[in-house]
Image (cartoon, rainbow, N blue to C red):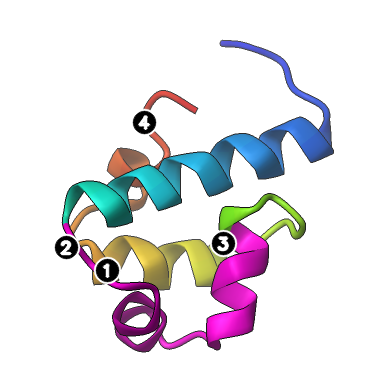
Amino acid sequence: MQSYTPEELSKKVGERIKALRIERGITTRDFADMANISHSFRHEIESGQVNPSLSILYSIAKAFNMSLSELLNGV
């Protein structure tokens, strides 16, 4: 398991979420609605500016129809 600083981890998680969103062809606004988060918060997550809570990550995983472990796979 790789060790990251909190800032690096936030960036990696954000990159993973953005890549999944783009891969699935989901718009930023649609994704924010699906995950029940604000559009601006979605941007902060994808850009690694914030460290989302487990409950937010769970909502994001559900929006992608995957488990939390699948969402974080490779991070």
Q: Which residue is mark 1?
A: 62
- Between marks 3 and 4 in the image, the one whose residue lies nearer the viewer: 4
What's the magenta region?
25-45
Q: Which residue is mark 2?
A: 65
Q: Position of residue 8 (x, y in %)?
A: 75, 31
Q: Amino acid at mark 4?
A: Asn
Q: Nearer the viewer, residue 74 or 11?
A: 11
User: How far, Cα to Cα, is label 2 from label 3?
Assistant: 16 Å
For disc 4, the marked residue is 73
Please state the horizontal and vertical placement of residue 40, each as a whole percent of the image: 63, 81
In what element is the residue under mark 4?
loop
Left or right, residue 24 beside residue 51: left
| Magenta stretch: helix, strand or loop mostly | helix
Quarter containing the N terminus = top right
Q: Position of residue 31 (x, y in %)?
A: 33, 75
**Disc 1 marks which amino acid?**
Lys
Where residue 16 sits, quadrant-wise, is top left
Q: Marks 2 and 3: which is nearer the front?
A: 2
Seen from the viewer's position, the closer of residues 61 and 31 is 31
Q: Earlier in the sequence, mark 2 or mark 4?
A: 2
**Residue ID for mark 3:** 54
Q: Residue at x 41, y 23 (%)?
A: 74
Badge 3 amino acid: Leu
Mark 2: which amino acid? Asn
The mark that comes first in sequence, 2 or 3, is: 3
